Image (cartoon, coloured by chain):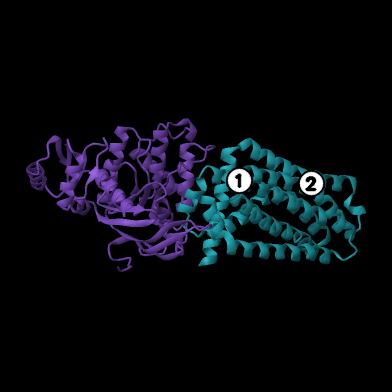
Chain colours: A purple, B cyan
Amino acid sequence: MSISGGSGIVVEFLNVTKVYNGGVVALDNASFSVAERSIHALLGHNGAGKTTSIRLMLGLLKPSDGVVRVLGRDPFREPEVRLSIGYAGEYIGLYRELSVWENLLRFCTFKLGDEELCKEEVGIVADVFELHELLRKKPQELSAGNRQRVVIARAFIGKPKLVVLDEPLNNLDPVWRARVKEFLKKYVEEQGATVILSSHILSDVEDLADSVSVLKSGRVVYTGGLKQLLEEQGVVKLVVKATDRTKLVNVLSKMGLLVHLAEDGESVVVYLKSESEAEEVLNMVSSAGIRLKYVNIEKATLEDIYLRIYGAKKNE
Amino acid sequence: MQARSFLKMIARMGVNDAKFLVLSNKVAFAGTIGFLGLYPSIVFYNMLVNIPLSQLPSNVLLRVLEPVILVNSLMCSMFVAIVVTSLIDTEKSEHVLEYLFAYMPYSTKVFLLSKAVSTTLLAIPMTLPYFAGTYIVLYRFGVADAVLLLSAYLPAVVMAVSLTLLLLLFTLIMPQKYTTILRFALIMVAFVGLAPLASLISKEEASLSVSIAIPCIASILMLVATTLIYIKYSDMLIEKAIR
């Protein structure tokens, strides 16, 4: 894996380990890269290492081992790269004493220095995220959804080349979730920018992401294109319920399939490459003399695959 | 390049903090400026009215002015350090600090050091009466004595930087309730401890230049020590503060 600023790679983690004081291993030999002009999602349970990865990208933390490159630079040693990064974190991080306008202006001048330029920039994001009615209010006077819009808007001040968003769609109503998703796609396309986001809402990730990295206990268990992941892991989900579940599981296992128990606790689930393969499996099950009570063939979602990755690794 | 970045950061930090203080709580900020500005003004007024300058021998006047300037400018710097570290406390508890770090195009070490320096610079407008005092000395005794007197300001400023750095250190790693107690304790120490210090300096038998040199050297040593502590531990402290 090469580390270069001009290779079309915006963020690169190469064998990165982060051990906090006290010995907590937040990232363990993690490697992944993010291509420019793309939306990359970081997935993982709480404590998997997503926020630590984001803080390493921002240069807020120093890796214990390995290399982190952002826009071709080491963000910890060359913090000026932050001028090209927008960030919206897990927390609101707004001054309670200042109005929304004063908050946005303060953060912008802190980053860019020029107050006149910042007035213009804040005006632009206020237009995009329809904040004009909120500008005079204090953050605590806003609803959770409106506060989230302000936090997202702040990340786009100055049109950064890289935008890092930690759970950006939390608290937004369905209308604004759709609008923000649309905006992110448009931003990447029009500005030639890159967006990295972490989210637990996997349907949103499926709508948005070009590529994903799945983290588990600080390790990268998958990294690559989302389409590729869906194809590799099986695009069809076959749900079957039989009168004799043990026999069904035995037959499916003999066919070399990885069998999962469905949420209802009775049905079993297998993931397959195509619908025709699912039909073949069903024929073989029938010819083994198993009586089926329920059959469903559906498109596998990212959530299915994510849970599979987590489940499979758990059993290893 | 590094020095220029550092100076830019001090300016940016100073402007932002001053604006924040004014925007967030205009009354309290104005009150602080008023109180801190008024206090030394009264001191000078009393000196000028009750003790006519013409009747004071020059060495006595200098020895009266010097500890007053040293102690009061230190006190002003200390007050500002307390105000600004309480601002950092708020920034930490409301997770604003994480965003400031994320948006700042400089390293966190530069951030902390420039925060301490800009904090001290914020104290200067509050100590303008001292410059007035220096002007009087300049008018009465000439440039050399005025420069000497003005240099009494230096240890106060340097000590304020060290003090702010130390307060920042505690603010980053300690829970808010403890840092509030710490700041309160510091104010008490300032009130109780500085007056005897002033009288000690004014009664000192040594010459004026020696009595100014001692706090100067002490404050510079203190600054070097705290800066070294910061350079060594700031990454760890920041990691702890944003986790």
Q: Is residue B194 left or right of residue A90?
A: right
Q: Which mark is residue B175?
A: 1
Local crowd size for mark 1, using a 10 Å CA cut-off: few (<14), some (14–19), many (≥20): some
Q: Is residue A91 left or right of residue B136?
A: left
Give the alpha-carbon distance from disc 2 to disc 1, as whole Å: 25 Å
Question: Pointer 2 indicates a residue of which chain?
Answer: B
**Number of callouts:** 2
Local crowd size for mark 2, using a 10 Å CA cut-off: few (<14), some (14–19), many (≥20): few
Q: Quadrant of residue A30?
A: bottom left
Q: Quadrant of residue A83?
A: bottom left
Q: Amino acid at mark 2?
A: Phe
Question: Pointer 1 indicates a residue of which chain?
Answer: B
Is any atom of residue B12 visible in this view? no
Label 2 element class: helix
Residue nearest the observer in this picture, B7 or A160: A160
Q: Which mark is residue B191?
A: 2
Give the residue at x 73% y 46%.
B185
Tags 2 and 1 on a common chain: yes
User: Residue B187: x and y, percent?
Assistant: 74, 46
Q: Quadrant of residue B161?
A: bottom right
